[in-house]
Image: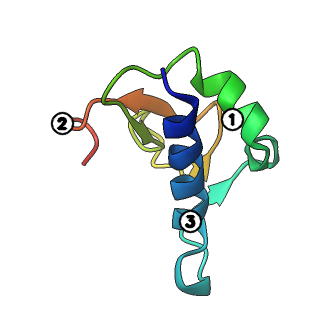
Amino acid sequence: MSKSYLKKAWMAMLGRCARDGKLKSYVCDEWLSFDCFYEWAATRYFEGAHLDKDILGDESRLYSPATCAFVTSDLNM
């Protein structure tokens, strides 16, 4: 598992939340810290995984430990 890959995933998540100055999604306060995100992600990430906030079924706009999972690219639509 690459810490640099997870850093890129974290930065991409933050970028999706403030695209063009409009909030499309939100990040929980805990995950505003890369170290907190990394602590959660390091035990769940697998090679080729994508971070998904919708797969757990509640159509959440929130990125958080309770609403996110790593999934294959096929599942991440």
Q: Quote the CA–CA distance across marks 1 and 2.
A: 23 Å
Q: In what element is the residue under mark 3?
A: helix
Q: In what element is the residue under mark 2?
A: loop
Residue 74 shown left or right of residue 5 in the figure: left
Q: Is residue 20 visible?
A: yes
Numbered mark located on residue 37 in the image = 1
Q: Position of residue 11 (x, y in %)?
A: 59, 54
Callout 2, which amino acid? Asp
Q: Is residue 61 visible?
A: no
Callout 1, which amino acid? Phe
Q: In what element is the residue under mark 1?
A: helix
- Above or below 39: residue 77: below
Q: What residue is pinned by disc 2?
A: 74
Residue 24 shown left or right of residue 32 in the figure: left
Q: Position of residue 20 (x, y in %)?
A: 54, 85
Callout 3, which amino acid? Gly
Q: What residue is pinned by disc 3?
A: 15
Residue 60 shown left or right of residue 71 in the figure: right
What residue appears at the point 18 percent right and 36 percent down from the top-left corner?
74
The answer to which quarter of the image holds residue 31 is: top right
What residue appears at the point 59 percent right and 26 percent down from the top-left corner?
41
Query: Which residue occupies the foreground of this view, 62 or 72?
Result: 72
Of label 1 and label 2, which has the lower sequence position?
1
